[in-house]
């Protein structure tokens, strides 16, 4: 996959409705037809808290259809708390769509999607697109407990085969979602989003199975447009996603640092050098 040069811009949106899917887990549906029409699976926005007292925060685009685009997020601090207090009719400015998104052009017919916690917010559009193309899609979805397996039925209704795991065993298999993936039938392609330890586990399993994997990395972005270089990850220099600045040959290394917000957030697992 390569970084896409898209015309991201500021969208002045209006909240259509707000749903609390679990304690401190909020889904905001936005009236944003231009954003919805240009969004690719795996892309995100920088949401600007209306008070202007906190910096913009990166949030995955969960839905994008017709005039509706939505963001699904966990309330974890000041910025997300302010966004979580928005109600129907409130205005929210967002910058996007940003990032490269998932590459769905490989033609895989048996796909595994792995989501951990809030990583579920990045994979609904991916699952929907793959299902429309006729692929078998298995969703491996893990969380700390049953309450935090939010919107799982939405994926089942769309046609995904669900494999659910919880740390406490309150729903589905007890243990990490990566263990369920490792025990499963081998897929042709893996797409994943979640916390870094989970993604490292997915990368290890993909290597063992000899399966390509695309990982959507989670990070706190300073700017979201690649200007601050505050969200870098080591990447092999020969990757098509490797940045051209600074030139790799100056350091004499076969590894360069790519910006998760700009060259990513999705990378091929075999090209990362964590």
Image (cartoon, grey):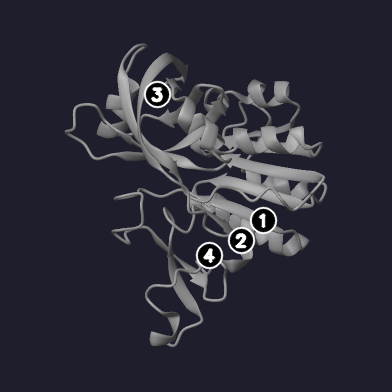
Disc 4 or 2, which lies upstream in sequence?
Answer: 4
Where does residue 80 sit, x and y in percent of width and height? 32, 31
Dot in front, 3 or 2: 2
Report if the CB atoms under discs 1 and 3 are less than 8 Å apart. Answer: no
Of all residues shown, which one is farthest toward the left?
53
Report if the CB atoms under discs 4 and 1 are less than 8 Å apart. Answer: no
Dot in front, 4 or 3: 4
Is 270 above or below relative to 128? Answer: below
The image's mark for residue 269 is: 2
Report if the CB atoms under discs 3 and 2 are less than 8 Å apart. Answer: no
Q: Read off the residue under disc 4.
A: 241
Relative depth, front residue between 117 and 95: 95
The image's mark for residue 213 is: 1
Is 33 above or below relative to 43? Answer: above
Disc 1 or 2, which lies upstream in sequence?
Answer: 1
SS for tag 3? loop
Q: CA distance from mark 1 to mark 3?
A: 30 Å
Q: For mark 3, does the 10 Å Cα neighbourhood hold few (<14), some (14 to 19), or many (20 or more) residues?
A: some
Is 195 above or below relative to 84? Answer: below
Disc 4 or 3, which lies upstream in sequence?
Answer: 3
């Amino acid at each position: 996959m390569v970084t896409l040069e898209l015309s991201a811009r500021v969208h002045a949106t209006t909240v259509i409705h707000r749903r609390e899917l679990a304690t401190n887990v909020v889904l905001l549906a936005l009236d944003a037809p231009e954003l919805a029409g240009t969004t690719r699976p795996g892309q995100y926005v920088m949401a600007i808290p209306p008070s202007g007292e906190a910096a913009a925060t990166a949030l995955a685009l969960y839905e994008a259809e017709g005039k509706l685009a939505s963001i699904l997020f966990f309330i974890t601090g000041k910025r997300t708390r302010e966004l979580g207090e928005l109600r129907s009719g409130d205005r929210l400015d967002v910058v996007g769509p940003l990032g490269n998104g998932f590459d769905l052009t490989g033609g895989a017919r048996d796909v595994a999607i792995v989501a951990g916690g809030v990583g579920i917010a990045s994979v609904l559009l991916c699952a929907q697109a793959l299902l429309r193309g006729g692929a078998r899609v298995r969703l491996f979805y893990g969380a700390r407990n049953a309450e935090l397996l939010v919107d799982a039925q939405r994926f089942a209704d769309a046609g995904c085969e669900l494999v659910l795991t919880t740390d406490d065993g309150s729903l589905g298999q007890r243990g990490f979602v990566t263990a369920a993936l490792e025990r499963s039938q081998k897929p042709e392609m893996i797409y994943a989003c979640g916390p870094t330890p989970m993604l490292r586990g997915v990368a290890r399993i993909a290597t063992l199975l000899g399966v390509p994997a695309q990982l959507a990395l989670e990070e706190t972005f300073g700017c979201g447009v690649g200007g601050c270089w505050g969200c870098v990850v080591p990447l092999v220099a020969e990757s098509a996603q490797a940045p051209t600045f600074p030139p790799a040959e100056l350091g004499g290394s076969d590894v360069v640092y790519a910006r998760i917000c700009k060259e990513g957030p999705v990378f091929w697992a075999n090209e990362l050098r964590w």
